[in-house]
Amino acid sequence: MKRVTGIGGIFFKTEDPKKLKDWYGKHLGFQVTDWGCSFLWNEVDNPNPKAPARTEWSPFKSDTTYFQPSEKPFMFNYRVENLVELLKVLKEEGVTIVGEMQEYPYGKFGWILDPDGNKIELWEPIDGGF
């Protein structure tokens, strides 16, 4: 079973997300939206997909609770295959699962903690769901 297949996103806290998004848009050319920026690409195993794959870049307000229970100012998001099965295996391996899996038109999400207390978001994407 494949586990992580790529980086799904970079999420971090900042005092002023709008100011930071504007700066990245102006100086680095990020095509920012309310949520951040999406980088589109094709997977090596699927060079002609119906929809490109995405990696998300998103600054969050510094007081967000989305990263809890981690106290870190960032969160990793990794793309995975078969999230339901992976969460079962991780639980059997003694990995701390955070919350319940959630499903949206753009994929399934689950959360775990690594040994340093970093919250990790696992995303089984539906790239055409955006």
Image: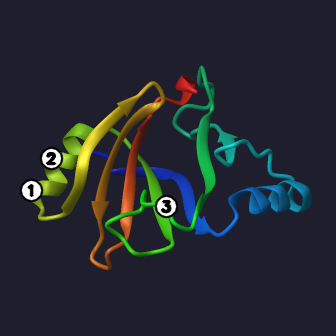
* Badge 3 amino acid: Thr
**Which mark, residue 37?**
none
Closer mark to the observer between disc 1 and disc 3: 3
Residue sitting at x 31%, y 54%:
111
Rounded to the nearest angstrom, the CA distance separating label 1 from label 3 is 30 Å
Question: Can you identify the residue that label 3 sits on?
Answer: 64
Asked if marks 2 and 1 touch (Cβ < 8 Å), the reply is: yes
Label 2: element kind: helix
**Residue 44 drawn at (x, y percent):** 57, 41
Is the residue 28 above or below the residue 82 in the image? below
Q: Residues within 10 Å of mark 3 (few under 14, many from 20)?
A: few
Asked if marks 1 and 3 touch (Cβ < 8 Å), the reply is: no
Quarter holding residue 85: top left
* Mark 1 vs 3, N-terminal side: 3
**Residue 121 drawn at (x, y percent):** 39, 54
Residue 22 relative to residue 50: left or right: right
65 and 33: which is toward the camera: 65
Colour scheme employed for the rendering of this structure: rainbow
Question: Can you identify the residue that label 1 sits on?
Answer: 92
Rounded to the nearest angstrom, the CA distance separating label 2 from label 1 is 6 Å
Question: Can you identify the residue that label 2 sits on?
Answer: 88
Query: Can residue 82 be seen here?
Result: no
Rounded to the nearest angstrom, the CA distance separating label 2 from label 3 is 28 Å
